[in-house]
């Protein structure tokens, strides 16, 4: 794959300081058997931008797709760069969504998910974006809300937070998270690897979305949180997230 491209960008501290390296890996919390090389996000964005503009981009994308299908894609940074390439490539919407359809199932930790979602500027409202384009992206995301895999659903949640958190879309977002059956969504993490009930990272992502919504639309978010049937531990995480944010620490969450 592209390990030879990534290696020169490994953080010197990650390579030389065990405490820093262990802390970096602990934050990402990769699944057993996955490898973290130790690159910073700005460097991965730079690499992805270069590859997305290169004449070899289609071959690189196919290589990623084949490796993921064969469960041979084990390097955290390779998966992150793959997703960032899809964000940065200049391609028609349907082609982009088709390529993301092969990437999203390969997401296996919160860091890959959130980095790629945050860079998905192609999904953000633009003045000249046709309404049907917006609707098409949302319909596509709804398919991931219906998934039974933790990070596919978190992908939909974080994409909604990053690119659809507007008043007109609040009912759609709230209805989608209200419909989640957390107990039927599978996580690949062993219970000892996370700090709460499974699927932990989806519960955290949902709480993060609600806390962000509280900052922008406090009345609507409180109304939803008070009448929703979300699990109590998700509501507790939401209240904690709201307390921790400078934007909402003094805003009642309920």
Image: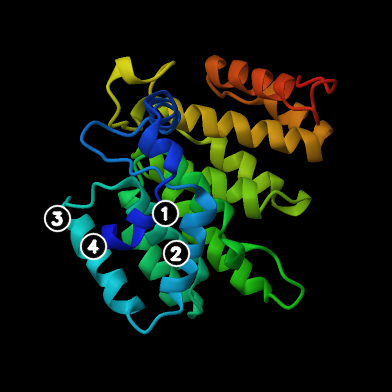
Q: Is residue 188 left or right of residue 179?
A: left
Mark 1 surroundings within 10 Å by alpha-carbon count, few (fewer than 14), some (14 through 19), many (20 or more): some
Separation of marks 4 and 2 at Cα, in angstroms: 13 Å
Question: Disc 3 marks which residue?
Answer: 70
Of mark 1 and mark 2, the one earlier in the sequence is 1
Q: Count of labels shown?
A: 4
Q: Which mark is residue 9?
A: 1
Q: Earlier in the sequence, mark 4 or mark 2?
A: 4
Q: Tell me the CA gap for discs 1 and 2.
A: 9 Å
- The reply to whether callout 4 and callout 3 are in contact (CB within 8 Å) is no
Residue 98, given in percent of the width and then of the height, sits at 37, 69
Q: CA distance from mark 4 to mark 3?
A: 13 Å
Quadrant assignment, res 127: bottom right
Q: Nearer the viewer, mark 4 or mark 3?
A: 4
**Marks 3/2: CA–CA distance:** 24 Å
Q: Is residue 99 left or right of residue 176?
A: left
Circle nearer the viewer, 3 or 2: 2
Q: Which mark is residue 1?
A: 4
| Label 3: which secondary element | loop
Q: Mark number for residue 47?
A: 2
For marks 3 and 1 on the same chain, the one whose residue lies earlier in the sequence: 1
Q: Nearer the viewer, mark 1 or mark 2?
A: 1
Give the foreground label among 3 and 1. Answer: 1
- At a point 62% along the width and 73% down the height, the residue shown is 132
Vertical comparison of 250 with 209: above or below: above
């Amino acid at each position: 794959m592209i390990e030879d491209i990534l290696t020169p960008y490994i953080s010197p501290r990650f390579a030389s300081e065990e405490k820093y390296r262990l802390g970096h890996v602990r934050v990402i919390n990769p699944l057993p058997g996955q490898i973290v090389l130790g690159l910073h996000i700005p460097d991965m964005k730079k690499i992805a931008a270069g590859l997305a503009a290169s004449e070899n981009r289609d071959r690189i994308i196919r290589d990623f797709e084949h490796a993921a299908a064969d469960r041979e894609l084990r390097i955290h940074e390779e998966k992150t760069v793959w997703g960032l390439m899809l964000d940065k490539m200049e391609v028609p919407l349907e082609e982009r969504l088709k390529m993301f359809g092969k990437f999203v199932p390969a997401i296996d930790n919160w860091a890959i998910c959130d980095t790629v979602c945050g860079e998905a500027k192609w999904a953000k409202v633009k003045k000249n974006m046709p309404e049907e384009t917006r609707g098409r992206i949302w319909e596509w995301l709804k398919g991931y809300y219906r998934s039974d895999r933790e990070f596919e659903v978190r992908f939909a949640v974080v994409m909604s937070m990053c690119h659809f958190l507007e008043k007109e879309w609040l009912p759609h977002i709230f209805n989608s998270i209200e419909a989640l059956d957390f107990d039927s969504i599978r996580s690949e993490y062993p219970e000892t690897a996370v700090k709460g009930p499974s699927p932990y990272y989806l519960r955290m992502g949902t709480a993060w979305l609600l806390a962000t919504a509280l900052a922008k639309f406090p009345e609507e978010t409180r109304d939803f949180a008070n009448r929703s049937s979300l699990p109590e531990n998700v509501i507790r995480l939401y209240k904690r997230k709201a307390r921790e944010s400078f934007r909402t620490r003094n805003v009642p969450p309920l």
